[in-house]
Amino acid sequence: MKDVVNIPAPTGPDGKGGMLIGSPVNMAWSIPKSNKHPEEAIKFLNWFYSEEALKFLDYGLEGEDYSLENGKVNYKYPTNADEINKENMHLMFLRFAGPSYLANESFMKGRKDGDVIANAIKIAKAEGRQDDGLDMPIPPTLQSKPELGKNGLWMETTAKIMTGKDPVDSFDKFVEDWKKRGGDQIIKDATEWYNAKNKK
């Protein structure tokens, strides 16, 4: 990746660039009420944040995938398909919870193109736009009419336009119909929530 260079995202008139800054929570675990040993489930999830777990998930098995020398990890980075598949197993598929291996700077430094990835993360952390709709509950109208959400009529209309089944101008008709079917109320509910949240 010698020709790959990380650069900041283009900025808008407000001087900001990058993607929306969303919630850092992308997964949640729940323990069923019927579970007879909930404390064991909690111990299992807590283990993924332990030093033992992070070392295993990042480096694999000691003596097989890495060795220790004066407390320093000497990791055997994969060089063929089988080794890569094995690494992917502990790096990703077995990581049910806890921080990503991307957060391990020493691990990333030794990887091929790890410096490029580390620099990309550094740039991404320094930019981004606040998501004004973060934590907004689903508006009542959208709960009763889920087809008005982005995965409903909008997705259907967009697919028809992109495949040439409908003309681009049909989008205006979609917007008009969407607003009449409850879209105006969704906008009203969302606006009221935003104003209440940002009331000074």
Image: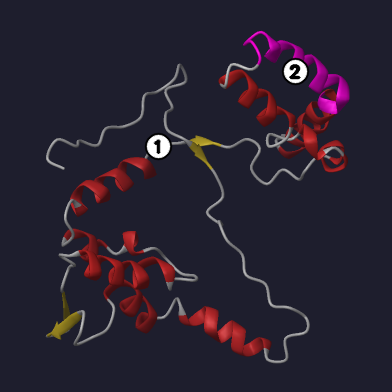
Could you say where residue 88 lies in the image, as x and y percent from the top left? 33, 66
For residue 178: magenta?
yes
Q: Is residue 40 left or right of residue 188?
A: left
Magenta span: 166-183
Q: Element under label 2?
A: helix
Provide the residue designation for mark 2: 174
Seen at 80% across and 32% down, the residue is: 192
Q: Main secondary structure of the magenta part?
A: helix
- Position of residue 23 relative to residue 34, above or below, is above
Q: Are marks 1 and 2 in contact (CB under 8 Å)?
A: no
Q: Is residue 200 left or right of residue 28?
A: right
- Position of residue 180 relative to residue 38, above or below, is above
Q: Quadrant of the N terminus?
A: top left
Which amino acid type is shown beneath numbered disc 1? Answer: Glu
Q: Is residue 159 left or right of residue 145?
A: left
Crowding at mark 2 (Cα within 10 Å: few <14, some 14-19, many 20+): some
Residue 4 lies in quadrant: top left
Please state which of the two labelled residues, at mark 1 or mark 2, is closer to the viewer.
2
- Position of residue 179 relative to residue 81, above or below, is above
Residue 173 lies in quadrant: top right
Q: Element under label 1?
A: loop
Which amino acid type is shown beneath numbered disc 2? Answer: Phe
Could you say where residue 39 lies in the image, as x and y percent from the top left? 64, 88
Q: Residue furthest top?
A: 169
Seen at 17% across and 65% down, the residue is: 80
Provide the residue designation for mark 1: 127
Query: Toward the viewer: 72 or 153?
Result: 153
Seen at 75% across and 18% down, the residue is: 174
Could you say where residue 124 lies in the image, as x and y percent from the top left? 36, 42
Query: Toward the viewer: 167 or 75?
Result: 167
For residue 81: magenta?
no
